[in-house]
Image (cartoon, rainbow, N blue to C red):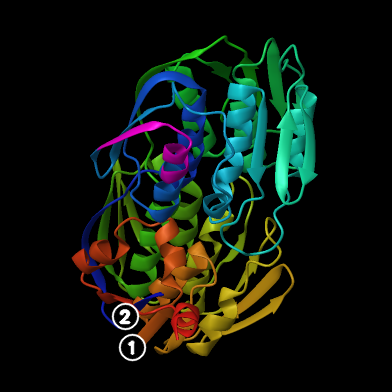
């Protein structure tokens, strides 16, 4: 059991360097299964989700060399045609990318239904629709997704997604790379990490165009070769530190970012009164007065990301006036609001809408990280609050934020990581 103890009320000042994009890395690592040769990947975030994926690949027979904390070499030339370990797969949502990768590599896949953050149902029906369109037969059997290609292999087709889905777009792209013919993904998601996955696959010999638009074209190739790739900076990690600086006050320079990817977050924080300066690969956030109210509706990229909803919610909880958040991606992503209310916030939630009446101060107390991004929001709230905040279930946070404790301490935050025995494990041992 991991918890963070935060003594708040101090502004943040200094420089923080952003790690590689989690949402790109969790797609790129499974995609290495398609490659005959060594992939050297840099700017890989050292987070628990990535360590799990590397362990899964290792147990499937991949050769893995860690050259540094953020550089890894992966050779899947001799990977066994095996089922990924269920106890690992169920701990990470992104394990569903193994379906597309194994289907493309071996012509069949058997992957346990994935786990990860629990904030409402996230069906994989659009993934299945795409796999079936390119010729696979897909069934759900005893908690496993079982996909099988026909004897003559997968073949290109048009896939029109019923809803914009990041996961489905990436998974279908992975599955179609080695299919014969041309696949078109229509109504595709446009997020930066989708472009990054396409760029990685192209660097290894794929022929993908249109990534970043709503139609992606994948011309099948016979094989992929090894090569070098560097993952883009993490848009959501950068946005989290921007929100932290805005909520707690101070002057923070955020380095290793792509400012264009941050435009929707930058615009909203400027609207709320934060002073933001953009550089070639950095963003500076200065906040020295109370923020103003604003409204946010989460939307697929380039709209405001659902993964930043809870962090901007903390800013709104401390802003002057009444703000409204409309969540259009995940209906049950407001669980953090109850935790914020325990800290003195005034938030009313009605299904997809949260109405936030800003308060002057939050006060520290014991709260829980309901999921990865909600956990980050609790950390921001703890830094901005008076007194001591304890964030329990902080293991969720470590799924997506590399060395958050060290980075925040470098900005002047008083935050400590504490490990305590798992209560269930203690009871079992007793």
Q: In the depicted view, which residue is nearer to us: 192 or 5?
A: 5
- In the displayed structure, would residue 143 be above or below residue 311? above
Residue 256 appears in the rendering: yes
Q: Does the magenta stretch include residue 324?
A: no
Q: Quadrant of residue 270?
A: bottom left
Q: Is mark 2 on a helix, strand or loop?
A: strand
Q: Where, quadrant-wise, is the N terminus in this rendering? A: bottom left
Q: In this view, does 345 lie above or below 102?
A: below
Foreground pick, 391 / 338: 391
SS at badge 1: strand
Q: Is residue 301 left or right of residue 420?
A: right
| Residue in the image at 56% along x and 49% along y | 89
Using the image as rendered, state which of residue 186 and residue 285 is in the foreground: 186
Span colored in magenta: 55-66
Q: Where is residue 165 in the image (x, y as percent from the top left)?
A: 67, 42
Q: Earlier in the sequence, mark 2 or mark 1?
A: 2
User: x%, y% of residue 426?
Assistant: 44, 82
- x then y, percent, for residue 201: 49, 23
Whole-angstrom CA distance, mark 2 to mark 1, is 6 Å
Cβ–Cβ under 8 Å for marks 2 and 1: yes
Query: Dot 2 corresponds to which residue?
Result: 6
Q: Which residue is drawn at 63% across and 66% down?
A: 333
> Residue at horizontal 65%, vertical 76%?
355
Q: Determine the image quadrant of residue 42.
A: top left
Instruction: Identify the disc placed on residue 388.
Output: 1
Q: Residues within 10 Å of mark 2 (few under 14, many from 20)?
A: many
* Quarter that holds the C terminus: bottom left
Query: Could one spot residue 312 in this view of the protein?
Result: no
Q: Of residues 68 and 215, which is closer to you in this image?
A: 68
Horizontal and vertical percent position of residue 411: 22, 66
Neighbour tally class for label 1: few under 14, some 14-19, many 20 plus, Cα within 10 Å: some
């Amino acid at each position: 059991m991991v918890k963070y103890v935060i003594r708040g009320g101090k502004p943040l000042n200094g420089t923080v360097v952003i790690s590689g994009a989690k949402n790109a890395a969790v797609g790129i690592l499974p995609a290495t299964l398609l490659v005959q040769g060594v992939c050297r990947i840099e700017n890989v975030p050292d987070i628990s989700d990535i360590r799990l994926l590397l362990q899964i690949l290792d147990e499937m027979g991949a050769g893995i060399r860690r050259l540094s904390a953020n550089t890894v070499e992966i050779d899947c030339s001799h990977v066994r045609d095996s089922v990924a370990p269920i106890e690992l797969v169920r701990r990470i949502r992104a394990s569903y990318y193994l379906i597309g990768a194994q289907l493309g590599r071996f012509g069949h896949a058997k992957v346990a239904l994935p786990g990860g953050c629990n904030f409402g149902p996230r069906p994989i029906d659009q993934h299945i629709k795409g796999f079936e369109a390119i010729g696979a037969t897909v069934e759900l059997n005893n908690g496993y997704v079982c996909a099988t290609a026909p004897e003559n292999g997968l073949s290109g087709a048009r896939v029109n997604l019923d809803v914009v889905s990041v996961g489905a777009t990436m998974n279908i792209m992975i599955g179609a790379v080695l299919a014969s013919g041309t696949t078109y993904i229509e109504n595709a998601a446009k997020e930066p990490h989708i472009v990054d996955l396409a760029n990685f696959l192209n660097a290894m010999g794929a022929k993908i165009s249109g990534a970043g638009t709503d139609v992606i074209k994948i011309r099948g190739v016979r094989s992929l070769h090894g090569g070098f790739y560097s993952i883009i900076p993490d848009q959501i990690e950068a946005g989290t530190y921007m929100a932290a600086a805005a909520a707690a006050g101070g002057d923070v320079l955020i380095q290793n970012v792509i400012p264009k990817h941050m435009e929707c977050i930058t615009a909203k924080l400027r609207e709320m009164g934060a002073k933001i300066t953009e550089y070639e690969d950095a963003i500076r956030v200065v906040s020295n007065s109370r923020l103003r109210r604003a409204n946010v509706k989460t939307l697929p990229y380039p709209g405001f990301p659902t993964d930043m909803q809870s962090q901007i919610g903390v800013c709104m909880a401390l802003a002057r006036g009444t703000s409204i958040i409309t969540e259009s991606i995940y209906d049950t992503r407001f669980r953090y609001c109850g935790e914020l209310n325990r800290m003195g916030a005034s938030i009313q939630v009605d299904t997809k809408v949260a109405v936030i009446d800003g308060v002057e101060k939050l006060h520290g107390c014991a709260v829980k990280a309901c999921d990865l991004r909600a956990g980050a929001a609790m950390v921001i709230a703890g830094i901005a609050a008076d007194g001591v905040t304890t964030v329990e279930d902080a293991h969720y946070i470590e799924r997506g934020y590399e060395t958050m404790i060290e980075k925040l301490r470098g900005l002047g935050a008083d935050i400590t990581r504490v490990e305590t025995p798992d209560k269930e494990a203690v009871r079992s041992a007793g």
